[in-house]
Amino acid sequence: MDFYRELSRVDGIIGIKFTSKDMYEMQQILDVCGEDFLVFNGPDECCLAGLATGACGAIGSTYNIMPEKFMALYRHVREGRLQEARAIQFEVNRLIRELLKYDFIAFEREILRLQGFDVGNPRKPLQQLTDAQRGEIRAIAERFPFLGVREAEEAGPAGA
């Protein structure tokens, strides 16, 4: 905690992204650094826990493919509606569980492509998806209507 206390006193540093799932450690950082030091939750699958512990917000990657879900979760927490926030966290975690079976970046880029945002393939040496994996990811995405995947023709080619 000495490191965080010292960091919070450095001019120009106003906060951190806390990437651990250890909410006790986050609480300790909040306690030793004071209210003016901003702590953002990092792990998407622990967004609710981080916000409930006292994070001022969250920075995550899966927010790119399901921003509405995380915006609703954030609003519910701020309004004290934890039951609704918990339901959303459980729902997005079901998708995250599927995502973890693949290369994270490749999976997200494929979901974005299926949503109509062709952001290209991951740069090498990162994993390139096979056609079979693209089909598997489409099937996963179709099980989660909130992702808003487009019909196969609308999604466009997978790119080279």
Image: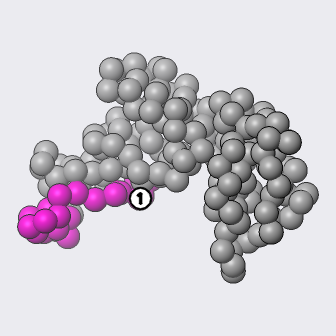
Relative depth, front residue between 49 and 37: 37
Q: Residues within 10 Å of mark 1 (few under 14, many from 20)?
A: some
Residue 9 percent across, percent down from the top left: 9, 64
Query: In which quadrant of the rendered image does the N terminus lie?
Result: bottom left
Residue 17: say if magenta: yes
Q: On the picture, is 126 further left or further right than 20?
A: right
Q: Residue at x 22, y 57 (%)?
A: 15
Quadrant of residue 56 in the image? top left
Query: How far across and down, in percent of the image, does residue 73 sit?
Result: 45, 30
Image height of 51 relative to 42, above or below:
above
52 to the left or right of 108 = left
* Residue furthest out toward the right: 132
Residue 116 lies in the magenta-colored region: no
User: In the figure, 105 relative to 116: above or below?
Assistant: below
Residue at x-position 60% and y-position 44%: 65
Residue 104 can be seen in this image: no
Q: How many callouts does the rendering have?
A: 1
Front position in the image: 48 or 148: 148
Left or right: 115 with respect to 87? right
Which amino acid is tagged 1? Thr
Residue depicted at 39% across the width and 19% down the height: 81
The answer to which of 22 and 132 lies nearer the viewer is 132
Q: Position of residue 123 (x, y in %)?
A: 66, 74
Q: Which quarter shows the C terminus?
A: bottom right
Query: Disc 1 marks which residue?
Result: 19
Q: Residue at x 38, y 46 (%)?
A: 58
Element under disc 1: loop
Residue 43: x %, y % from top left: 47, 52
Colouring style:
one colour
The part of the chain drawn in magenta is: 2-22
Question: Can residue 55 be seen?
Answer: yes
